Amino acid sequence: MMGNDAVVWPADLPNSYIGRAVPRANLARLTQGRGEYVSDLQLPRMLHVVFLRSPYAHAEIVSIDVSAAAGMPGVARIVTGAEMAGHCTPWVGVLSHLKGLKSAPQHALAVDRVHWQGEPVVAILAASRAQAEDAAEHILVEYRELPAQVDMFEAAAPDARPIHPELGDNIAFERRLDAGDVDAAAAASDHILSRRFVFARHTGVTLEARATIAEWNRAEQRLTVHMGSQAPHMIQNIVARHLNLSEAQIRVITHDVGGSFGIKVHIYPDDMAVCALARMTGRPVKFVADRIESFTSDIHARDHVLDGRIGVRNDGTITFFEIDDITGIGPFSVYPRTSAVEANQVVNLTGGQYAVPNYRARTRVVFLNKTPTCQYRAVGHPIACSATEGLVDLAARAIGMDPVEIRRRNLIRDDGYPCSAPSGIRFEALSHHAALDKLLAMMDLPALRADQAAARTRGVYRGLGLASFIEITNPGPAFYGVGGARISSQDGASVKLDASGCITVASSITEQGQGSAAIIAQVTATAIGVKLESVRVILGDTDTTPYGGGTWASRGAGIGAEAAFQAGRALRENILKLAATILQSAPENLDIHLGVVVDKLTNTERLTLAELARIAYFRPDTLPQDFQSELMATRHFVPREYGFAFTNGIQASYLEVDTETGFIRLLKHWVVEDCGQPINPLLVDEQVRGGVVQGLGAALFERCHYDGQGQMINANMADYLVPMAGEMPDIEVAHVISPTRESAIGAKGAGEAGTAGAAACVANAVNDALAPLGVVITEIPLSPEVVLRALHGG
Amino acid sequence: MKAPAFGYLRPASLAEALALLQSHPDAKLLAGGQSLLPALNLRLSQPSHLIDIGRLAELCGISVQQGRLRIAALTRHAELQASPLIAQAAPLLHAAIQHVAHPAIRSRGTIGGSLANADPAAELPACALALQARIDVLGPGGARSIQACDFFTGLFETALGSDEILAAVEIDTPCEGAVFGFQELARRSGDYAIVGLAAAGRVEGGALAELRLAYFSVGATAILATNAAACLLGTAADPASLSRAEAALAQDLDPPDDLQASSATRLHLARVLLRRVVSSMMPQQRLAA
Amino acid sequence: MIAITLTVNGETIAAQVEPRTHLVDFLREQLGLTGAHLGCEHGVCGACTIRVDGAIVRGCLVLAAQADGSVVETIEGLSDSGEISDLAQAFIDRNALQCGYCTPGMLIAAQDLLLHDPSPTREAIREHLSGNYCRCTGYHAIIDAVQATARAREQA
């Protein structure tokens, strides 16, 4: 569907809320501590489940003795993998369009072998969490430890012992790409720079851990799953499939969600077990991961080593990019989204912001006996961006060119769209140069360079780094579904006028704090012509919302809100038809302003929506006999022309490196991004800032430390470091607006832009600071140890 | 993550607390609880009972008597931080305490609890060493005092008997020429430091007449770097003396490897802190008392 | 089980608790005051921050038994009394919360700062809130909201 001709909102209408920074409604619930998170819920007769998890990275289960635990106070039932297998079928996390991707069957509870430290083995149900934990200490599991694959290079070697012998090797997926002519481009280069980029494994650390309550109604034969999922309809499908129920027998309710970032877009073995246990016991079963088990059971991400190469001519022309990427996932590809997508994105995205036709890439996705990895905020983006922008800076340095200048010369021109990248991804309209110009104006580059030079005379090493990026948003019709996963790429909205003249809109996208409800209300109010306060939004309930994908991959605003806008438009037409009947006018002569039907020409108020609703619902006898009011409308939307609505932007970091201690102090951060039409700039800015800080966590702090036996040794909140307020910089955010023409609103996504480029510009800034010392670091997190090792060797 | 079951006893007096400690050999004392409760929640500790001494008035109060500052065991970190008496009579503690965790921890954590817990990464044990604190304990046999240098015996281990209660810490108020320095290198504000240094000394005629360098997060206990300090005695902490002290630090410290830093990096950082802290203590840039 | 009596948000509560029950679980599960959240249960994240006898504490590092005789204030109480209504509104206006899970603890910690330091610098705000994790906002908006509240209170 082609939309309006690049309308830039706010349109000059009295009730246009699109493009306006209005505060989110209903936040008082959260500021007053009156939200309703799944972890807050207590249901009658509820049992608490604790999972005894594997202490080993890889072991055979020899025996399980639950006899001592079974009689302990409060214990209701103890279930092992063997029993669970009779109630929940195993799954295999592959997608058919990722050619060659393989994985092995995975069970809710391990049956005869454990494959990572943290894999659930036994479920203990008791009256309280404490009692279940007490009992768990008395379950005796005998393991026979097996050698663990913990190093991605060793595991990928041809002679490596496969974790799953039936799969033949540990290579879950491999992709190669060769576009243009890299060898010829290399031959025509004045300089070729090579560099290894290392990205630690990290995880999402949602402040509310994963929480699931399932309740089985034996009379109705229905399962209600309370789960803070980003994709409730996906959960409905998967639970139905593996519990041998129909989707109609499953209701998923998300409630308030305490952070997600991709962690809660998946379904986990323990979640599946909770659903099965509820059905087995006929009682509500509550699982709230504690923080320790979160670290080894929530999905991990990244963990890539990428060898990059770039060619450049002395005039600044980049001639080619080449990458050889490898990533260590878990022992299984995660179901149903798979663990190959991040690597696939790295191949798709690397170099994509530059007009460089020659590109060669390989990625390998390798099974390891570690916590499974899967999609976490900005899937693949920070890896592609850090490699690309790190290589570009190396090239600039090799030819003595300013990092700004080399980007100006090679970024795709703003008038060069639509176009495609060598990896095949297609760009509708990006704005790299406008974004760069805006960034430079915002940060006052000459003043920063002067400050940097002055600092250096005092022996203080400050540096400035840039990172331009592209972001995948609004995934289109050929996403997931094409690979065989029942994850919808379309979203829907139902909008109705109630009897008091207020609007209720139910949407299939979900809220994790980004402001989904707020933007749905804004676009709906705008489409109909009502006050924002008169719109109530319903999200996150498969019984009451239209069918759709949910909120992930930066799709809520671009897809979900467009559906609500279209539904609002449709309802508006219906309202005007009814108003015209009541007023003996014609719909085209009427308009709706702030909840009142007016004469289009004179703006004279004719009829409030409350009065219109009263007539429709209670006095249809006063309407013509052949007229039926229809005050509810539903629309669905999926972009059709482009596979993704790519966005772009550029970030900059200014920082100081203490060369004696290796400590890095972030001084300031800037972002210019282009998410098309912002629906609510206030929300977009904070999405960007929050995303930046998650990227800064990766840049400086976050790392899942594993020992040689596959034990995660910092699996607690004190030793796994995430950003806190004290070390984070102020972040300036600005926008360029290039609306997508695939929708009427023109919105693209903004949820991952911040994370995509933050680590890259920090690394570039560190290398700028250390340039006088001849040091280049391309490993994150940039811990003091890493910095000192680079500076002093050893 | 819920604590294992235990009994809870709240004695009304110190005498009763001592009696309960004798009659419940597997009990633990609960003061501020800011180290004990995380350990319980993680099920790293499974005491039969907790004996809550947190309200015993006999263990509260800060006073100065005859040139000695006495800080009773239940003095909370927040009280240390806010106390003008501490700022004046123990500037090192005043400087150190703001590095201890976060406000909501400092409002509960106590000095007695911190010393008795003897976490090698904690700030206060190192301060006690640097200040030559005397630790007063009460047991069934009466009161006794332990010098800080004899108190910290190992990883989370002290000279405190299992039937004894730490009652107070006493330190000398600053004498003429007394100087103090404190710095730590922590990844994030409030984190345990990778390396930290609490230092106390005396400057006479522009030269260091006394110096105690107490490092933390470098071994099983806070450690006095006596060899390094010796290199600086009688000097004005000139670059050459500092270099000698840095070299001598290898005789004092053999730090462990861990997630945050290798042993070599820790020693390097300890040397950086040595130079920075000692320089800050010299008259022209002394830490304001 | 042991008997405790305490004041929670102005109301006197007498209850029986297991000795091992920490105060935040008591508030959430026995009293239904779920505004204080569990984020880590080992004293790091600050999501369970509440006020006991006027001081902010980690609700997961205080036993309910220890709170016997204490005055406990939670986000629900501070909201109902109006004590933090300006601060909460500043958070809403500035979009200084997203998922809202850290917000009750963040508001209580921020109010604690403003009571002790009515005109804090951005650095002082960052330092005081450094024991309260927020995974959504990036902190900038929170610092803005606290600063705006401080300024408004000073002018009031």
Image (tube, coloured by chain):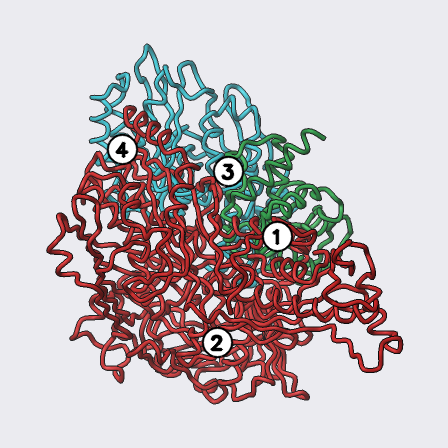
The letter of the cyan chain is: B
Q: Which residue is mark 2?
A: A487
- In this rendering, the answer to whether B246 lies above or below B174 is below
- In this rendering, the answer to whether B211 lies above or below A39 is above
Tag 1–tag 2 contact (CB < 8 Å) = no
The percent coordinates of residue A41 (x first, y second) are 64, 67
Amino acid type, label 1:
Ala
Foreground mark, 2 or 3, reads: 2
Q: Nearer the viewer, residue B79 or A704?
A: A704
The percent coordinates of residue C27 (x first, y second) are 67, 57
The percent coordinates of residue B256 (x first, y second) are 28, 47
Q: How many callouts does the rendering have?
A: 4
Tag 4–tag 2 contact (CB < 8 Å) = no
Tell me the CA gap for discs 2 and 3: 43 Å
Q: Nearer the viewer, residue B76 or A393?
A: A393
Q: Which residue is mark 4?
A: B271
Tell me the CA gap for discs 4 and 3: 27 Å
Tell me the CA gap for discs 1 and 4: 63 Å
Tag 1–tag 4 contact (CB < 8 Å) = no
Amino acid type, label 4:
Arg
Foreground mark, 1 or 4, reads: 1
The letter of the red chain is: A
Amino acid type, label 3:
Glu
| Crowding at mark 4 (Cα within 10 Å: few <14, some 14-19, many 20+) | many
Q: Which residue is mark 1?
A: A11
Q: Chain of mark 3?
A: C
At numbered mark 4, what does the secondary structure look like: helix, strand or loop? helix
What is the number of the mark on residue C127?
A: 3
